[in-house]
Amino acid sequence: MPQQQTASQRATAPAAAPALLPLRPDAFTVPYRDPVWDGPTDPVLAADHLNGEWVLFYTQRRATQPGLTGVEWVHGTGIGVARSSDGGATWRYQGTVDGLVPPETELPATLWAPDVVRIGDRWIMYLTVLGGRRTDWTGSAGIVQFASRDLQTWEYLGRIELDSPRVIDAAVARCGDGRYRLWYKDESRGSNTYSAVSDTPEDPSSWTLEGVAIPGRAHEGPKVVRLGGSYWMIVDEWRGQAVYRSADGAGGWTRQDHLGGLVLTAPESVDARPVVGRHADVVPLGDGETSDGGTQRALLVYFTHPYWGGEDIGTMAPDPRTRLSHVRAAVLEVRDGILVCIEH
């Protein structure tokens, strides 16, 4: 017979982690605002099965800090964290992530646009790092990797060599050929999306350059997800999110024709002008499974500047409210081979 626990043993046994509730299609119905600087941008979600919560990471822009000039308010930024135990309906601010400044980085460091991916038994963070606080868009920028077993303590793994002085906005996913790809914005090459490939994506030295993935009009913030049997990439064109499709995610990206290939062109408005959805994450929803085990729907998590249209950051009005941002969400759904956006 199995030995039974005594009352004392039961009292001291660690409590089981609460079950992770599925991400809600109506998550962020109340937009998330950063309680420190009121400037959350570049959101990404991670599922914390150890604690039964969803974790929101984001760039914590210093939107309300006084005395800053030029674009200094988007530099010197940390990575903010919030958690949700109800599927994304409500969020609790947790501060900023410690330990994300690589050795020999010029201080104070600027941290932008993390992507957090579960690979094996760890989470890997791909993070943009710049040295110093700048008032303009100069300076080198690179992508580094960290690893964590609990989404709280992070170990530095190293820098990814991408043969460019200015690369930002990492996104990583496993493709149909079984290999992992890293997509990123190369600001020294027309601000287009480039890719690198790896079979061991937890190793920063393993990435091999492939070249341009999405050419043409300048853009940023790529994100790739598999829905409805295809791979989809969204990129931020600063007039909405552009939609591209690939059979396997390894290449051959073609722009969607529907509505000019754009979604989130006007989820809000200010002074009768459209406010566009900016730099987004895409997380598959657990409903609507297809016959091959994939999903048909995903949550598109993005940010907006509710008091500014979002055309060109250099054209911002002097009104300090224009710097404010918040995080919202919409649902993406594959219908007859077209990726459509359902805003709420």
Image: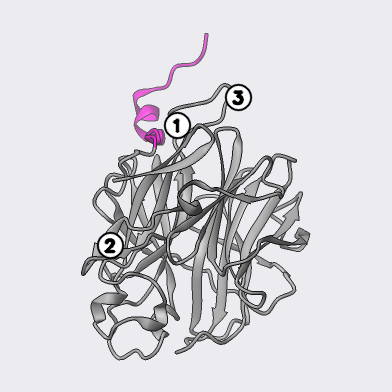
Q: Residues within 10 Å of mark 1 (few under 14, many from 20)?
A: some
Q: Which residues are magenta?
A: 1-22
Name the amino acid, label 3.
Answer: Asp
Asked whether the beta carbons under mark 2 and mark 3 sit within 8 Å of each other, the answer is no
Quarter of the figure with residue 225: top right
Quarter of the figure with residue 287: top left
Residue 277 rendering spot, x and y as whole percentages:
38, 59
Work out which residue is located at the far top of the displayed protein and give it.
1
At 57% across and 86% down in the image, what residue appears? 106
| Viewer-side residue, 64 vs 205 | 64
User: Spatial distance from mark 1 to mark 3, Cα to Cα?
Assistant: 14 Å
User: Spatial distance from mark 2 to mark 1, Cα to Cα?
Assistant: 26 Å
Q: Is residue 67 visible?
A: yes
Looking at the rendered image, the disc whose residue lies closer to the viewer, 1 or 3, is 3
User: Spatial distance from mark 2 to mark 3, Cα to Cα?
Assistant: 38 Å
Checking the image for residue 286, the label placed there is 1
Name the amino acid, label 2.
Answer: Arg
Check disc 1 and report its element: helix, strand or loop.
loop
Judge from the rendering whether residue 197 lies leftward or rightward of residue 214; answer left or right.
right
Q: Residues within 10 Å of mark 3 (few under 14, many from 20)?
A: few
Q: Which residue is mark 3?
A: 292
